[in-house]
Image (cartoon, helix red, strand yellow):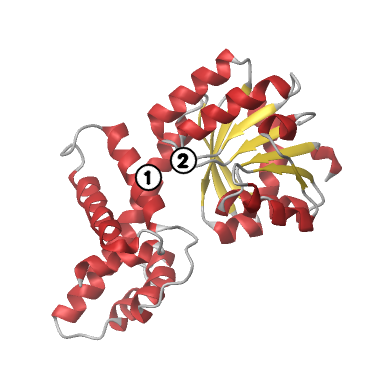
Amino acid sequence: MSGLGKVVILGTGIMGRALAERLLGRGVDVTVWNRTAERAEPLAEFGATVAATPAEAVASADIVLMTLFDAEAVVSVIREASGAAPAGALWVQMSTIGVDGTDQVVSVAADHGLALVEAMMLGTKGPAESGTLVLLTGGDADRLAAVEPLLAVISQKRVVAGPEVGAGTRLKLVCNTWIGLLTAGTGQAFAMLRALGLDERLFLEAIAGGQSDTVYAHAKGGLMLADDFQPANFQLRGLHKDLELAEAATGDAGTFPILDAVRGLYARAEEQGQGAEDIAAVVRVFA
């Protein structure tokens, strides 16, 4: 994998760390940075170089992956690090920051002369570790072609959403809204079964293997039935944030009533203290 050059990951939260471990396991030269240094330091044991600052991290970088929390963090890192990066470095925006946030990042990147594309991650920690993410890409075709060998290591499929940075973000908001709807719908199905005096597991048995089957019913349904939520790979508060971004991007409340309803369910779940749980915790709003 030496042909991939030096890869820098800015932000080592759940997804950034998983990407780093995947690349390090394939022999890629990886440098990492995180604002809270303690979250990046364990990656040194896997062979990563841990930088003290974003500018230090991107020095001599070939590709920079940004996996940060919000648009403010992405803009801050670009401003802090861009002057230290080689002129030919490719910057890949992978953070879910919404349409307005992405537009801001595109503007700041242009001001600093950066070659920017986006590759939005559809999937959670497990797929990131195994290289089976789906990436929703946007940006200049030549730049995307240049990062394709790296993206192929961390994903099973790339969907080109459009030639501009921001198209992948828009598609990601649609996909995450659908995931939120599926998971909330599974929770409602279990609540309806209880109200009708039926065993919850009958729902999973009924859809298993049929046209209406979905991995989200089974993967999240098992957690719901057990009422024993595991450490989050997709935290409920993260999906709630994405639903808020989707509503902000698509118009005022009432434009998409199902989005409004699903967003409201996740908001209630977070208000009830479920924010750090897996997204399956939305089932508790029906209790």
Question: Which residue does the image show at 18% across and 38% down from the upper left?
Answer: 253
| Viewer-proximal residue among 166 and 10 | 10
Q: Are marks 1 and 2 in contact (CB under 8 Å)?
A: yes
Give the quarter of the figure containing the C terminus: bottom left
Name which of mark 1 and mark 2 comes first in the sequence. Answer: 2
Horizontally, residue 41 falls left or right of residue 66, namely: right
Rendered view: 285 above or below 250? below
Q: Give the spatial CA distance, label 1 vs label 2.
A: 7 Å
- Residue shown at 16%/85% (left/top)? 197
Q: Residue at x 36, y 58 (%)?
A: 275
Tell me: 205 left or right of 32: left
Q: Is residue 64 left or right of residue 270?
A: right
Residue 235 location, quadrant:
bottom left
Residue at numbered disc 2 = 96
At which x and y percent is residue 155?
Answer: 62, 49
Per the image, the residue denoted by label 1 is: 242
Residue type highlighted by circle 1? Asp
Give percent across and percent down for residue 252.
Answer: 20, 33
Of residues 246 and 189, which is closer to you in this image?
A: 246
Does 89 appear above or below 268? above
- Whether residue 47 is visible, yes or no, is yes
